[in-house]
Amino acid sequence: MRASDWSSEIDDFVKRYGTGIFPDAGTTGLGDALEKATAEREKYRKREIDGLSAAERDFPASVETERKKI
């Protein structure tokens, strides 16, 4: 396909689906989105930290200790 073919395909797609996919798009403000993203990131971080083994949790501190010895 050439670029002009893709252009017509995309235009056709937008005509068919462009108005109905996200009917409430744009109603969430930036502040709300950032709060939600931050909260989800913290939940993810907590889950990741809780899922670490003892060796994995202690590794950064042991590397720092060894670095200070050098």
Image (tube, grey):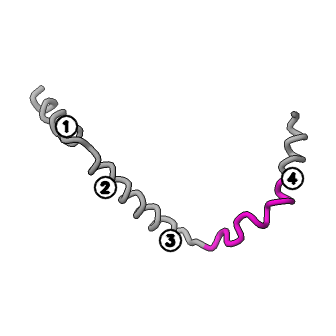
Between marks 3 and 4, how big is the CA–CA gap? 32 Å
Residue 53: % across, % down: 23, 41
Question: Magenta includes 22?
Answer: yes
Amino acid at the residue labelled 2 = Lys
Amino acid at the residue labelled 4 = Asp
Q: Residue 32 carries which label?
A: 3
Q: Earlier in the sequence, mark 2 or mark 3?
A: 3
Towards the viewer: 18 or 67: 18
Start-end of magenta stretch: 13-27
Towards the viewer: 62 or 49: 49
Residue 29: % across, % down: 56, 72
Amino acid at the residue labelled 3 = Asp
Q: Residue 46 carries which label?
A: 2
Q: Earlier in the sequence, mark 3 or mark 4?
A: 4
Q: Residue 55 carries which label?
A: 1
Q: Which of marks 1 and 3 is nearer the N terminus?
A: 3
